[in-house]
Amino acid sequence: MSHNIHAEPVGHGNSPAAWSAVLVMILGAAVSSVAFCLASPVLFWAGIAVMFLGLGVGYVMKKAGYGVNGSKLGPSRGH
């Protein structure tokens, strides 16, 4: 028996803003991972910075209308 505790659909962040943010953060994680194996502190922290940049990318795209139910998305997108 399943109980729905949400009054409205959650959406799970399925939007261009969310996907872009996640892809940038994955790139940063990959850079940091390789840098860790190469013992390169500068490159490691550069990868961490790219991960934080991914948060900014998602935020800016959401504010620009590309988030869930954003103004730039058609009626069939962003849900």
Image: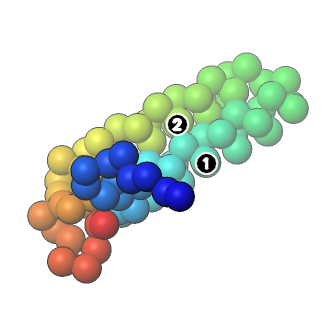
Left or right placement of residue 54 versus residue 10 in this view: right
Whole-percent x, y for residue 41 in the image = 73, 20
Question: Is 43 rendered above or below residue 60?
Answer: above
**Disc 1 to disc 2, C-alpha distance:** 8 Å
Q: Residues within 10 Å of mark 2 (few under 14, many from 20)?
A: some
Whole-percent x, y for residue 29 in the image = 65, 39
User: Between residues 57 and 4, which one lies in front from this camera angle?
Assistant: 4
* Residue furthest front in the image: 1
Identify the secondary structure beneath mark 1.
helix
For the point 18% across and 77% down, the residue is: 75
Sequence-first disc among 1 and 2:
1
Identify the secondary structure beneath mark 2.
helix
* Residue furthest left in the image: 71
- Residue 27, label in figure: 1
Question: Is 70 rendered above or below residue 77?
Answer: above
Question: Given the image, on which type of amino acid does mark 2 rest?
Answer: Val
Q: Are marks 1 and 2 in contact (CB under 8 Å)?
A: yes
Whole-percent x, y for residue 43 in the image = 68, 29
Left or right placement of residue 31 versus residue 5 in this view: right
Which residue has dot 2 on it?
Answer: 50
User: Between residues 46 and 63, which one lies in front from this camera angle?
Assistant: 63
For the point 54% across and 43% down, the residue is: 25
